[in-house]
Amino acid sequence: MSTFVLLTITGVGLGAMYFLIASGLSLIYGLMGVLNFAHGAFITVGAYTTWWTSVHVFDGVHSVLVRFLLSALLALIVGGVFAALVELVLIRPLYLRHIEQVLVTVGLSLAFVALVEGIWGPDQRAFDVPPWLHETTTIAGARIPNDRWVEIATAAVVLGLLQLFLRRTRYGLIIRAGVENRAMVTALGIDVRMAFTLVFAIGGLAAALAGVLSGVYFSAISPGQGVSLLIFAFIVVVIGGLGSIGGSAVAAAVVGLTQQYANYYASSGIGDMVVVLLLGLVLLARPQGLAGAATGARA
Amino acid sequence: MNRKALADYVIPAAVFAALAFVPKLGWDLPKVFDSPVSSPGTLQLLAVCMLYGALALSYDLQFGFTGLLSFGHALYVALGAYVTNIAITIWGWSFWQAIVFTIALALVLSTVLGVVSLRVGGIAFAMVSLAFAQAGAVLVRKDPHHWTHGEEGLGADYTKLPHHFVGIVNTKYLYWLALGFLAAVFFIVRWAVESSPGRVWQAIRENEVRVEVLGMRPRAYKLQAFVLSSVLAAGGGIVYMLLYNSSNPALTAPEFTLTLLLMVVIGGAGSRWGAVLGGILYHYLDDRLTAMGGSETIQQLPSVLRTPLEQPLFLLGVVFILIVVFLPGGLAGIAARGRPTGLRRLESAIRTGAPAEPLEEA
């Protein structure tokens, strides 16, 4: 029983990271039709900014917790700004040329990983976090590492904020309308391009947050980590239904849990395969994904 | 003989035949290659370049000619390299048995995965193909049966390989093998895209809805292109295994498919020569830039300049982005000035909804 509880909480914690990445991907795809490969770079930006600033900028701060929070906050800002710049400089000039937009983000993702490897080396870097995060809390006989709670809580807060933003604000309304029918929104005289930059900034911020949390989860960061997380986020987006935040949240939890259970009860490494199998089954039964609001293929 | 047959068959055949004499030449091109052209080092480099030309062309068959953006092509290259090697080295099969089995397996696997993944189109297809390839990568790295040797890669049992393909003195045979494979892929792709299903593939790229309205089922045609392209990729994997005498887990990484995509776009999507030249040039630059990164001139630069210059993938990635933004036809687009080519062609067709002019008519 205690193992099951541990696996469940850990699975949801992993799913929380997937959700943070997938929510941005899903919004960007839903609104702009762009599959954003550069999302992996945003994750890396978040992780490396936190690590670098906590060593070089905030090294005078004595409390580990305050230092971690300051560098994480800075990482979110850097991630958001970086993503907005990517949209303005690389995506916007290729407006409506979807394939080229995807290709540019692919090029950026490869070049960025190579650059990070060049500067900080290909090896893992230890990630300094408040010691409390690696202590455990006992729930129903299971000793749960505390960082899992932080990951789940963060994702829940982000999910809540995103839903509030999308349902209660004017920009949220424009984004939702744009996901539904961009041509109509444009025809009504609303400049959707502003919304493009905005979803990129939001996506970059959430991905940077996922980068910080992945550093906490794995206790280390490496240049390739972003891209490997990104692949599971893609799976989450497809299973959840392109363009749906709620669908992404459910699919993220399902994928995270499936991975954990299969890795423990079957054998280590099987989890990744089972997730891919799950993706195949969902496609056979319901090609538009769980939430399936989007019209499927929009190449 | 008409001009088209001349351009499509006679000229390529002449080029490939001329390339076959390279190992016999005594040239020394110090700026281009480290060692004389007929030396094993240079022949090996050229062989790998041509292999990448062939792999890029196999990828172009689905991306440039059919409009299928896949991120999982690496799966089939890795299948070719690993299954042949495992059959020979671990199961002790003969070379030819292993090859027949590998091609048959590639045929079956690509058909099954194609049927599933082609249920979705466009970007969702890209993501699904990526997920399947990732499953392959995990399988190779976790190595449940101790067949692939995980991160180390699997060295081939060279006593079972045809003896012409073993040893440094025999590099010229590997060069001819790669050249032969490139020529075979080139002519197969030429034949396939000009066949009547091939015309439907290109019609699907231009406008899938119209193909459907005309009463054809795009999915069956897309599956054909996908399977042919995947089987050619598996063939490339077998050549890779012979060239390197081993199977390398780097083949399974998603980045491997992305580099094939880079090659095709740099050369010119939807163009046979473009894809081949893109593959050759990309690998050549990758190799030379790596050598250049270690050179003294670069090492003496301040670190701000040195770090990016030491990373070939960074430089190639930047070149790629510049080409996508400023030269969407790729290198082939420069040759065919005035006519829309490559990505520009794909995009203009999608935007206007009008069928673009046939690509190959001169």
Image (cartoon, rainbow, N blue to C red):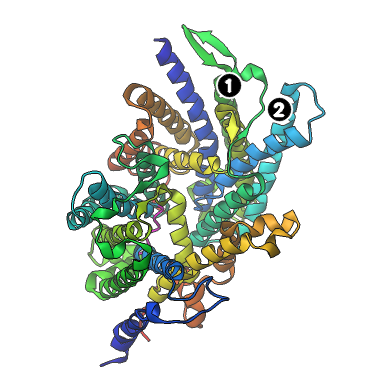
Task: Specify the subunit that label 2 lies on.
Answer: A
Query: For the point 47% across and 58% down, which residue is it?
Result: B259
- Which element carries disc 1, helix, strand or loop? helix
Q: Quadrant of residue B47?
A: bottom left
Which residue is depicted at the point 23% across and 48% down?
Answer: B87
Q: Which mark is residue A147?
A: 1
Quadrant assignment for the N terminus of chain B: bottom left
Decide if residue A279 is in sight here.
yes
Above or below, comparing residue A168 to residue B267 in the picture: above
Is residue B68 highlighted in magenta?
A: yes
Residue identified by numbered label 2: A68
Q: Which residues are magenta?
A: B66-71
Mark pair 2, 1: CA separation: 13 Å
x then y, percent, for residue A104: 55, 58
Query: What x and y, as percent, mark residue B18?
Result: 36, 83
Q: Name the kind of residue labelled 1 in the image.
A: Asp
B313 or B193, which lies in front? B313
* Mark 1 belongs to chain: A
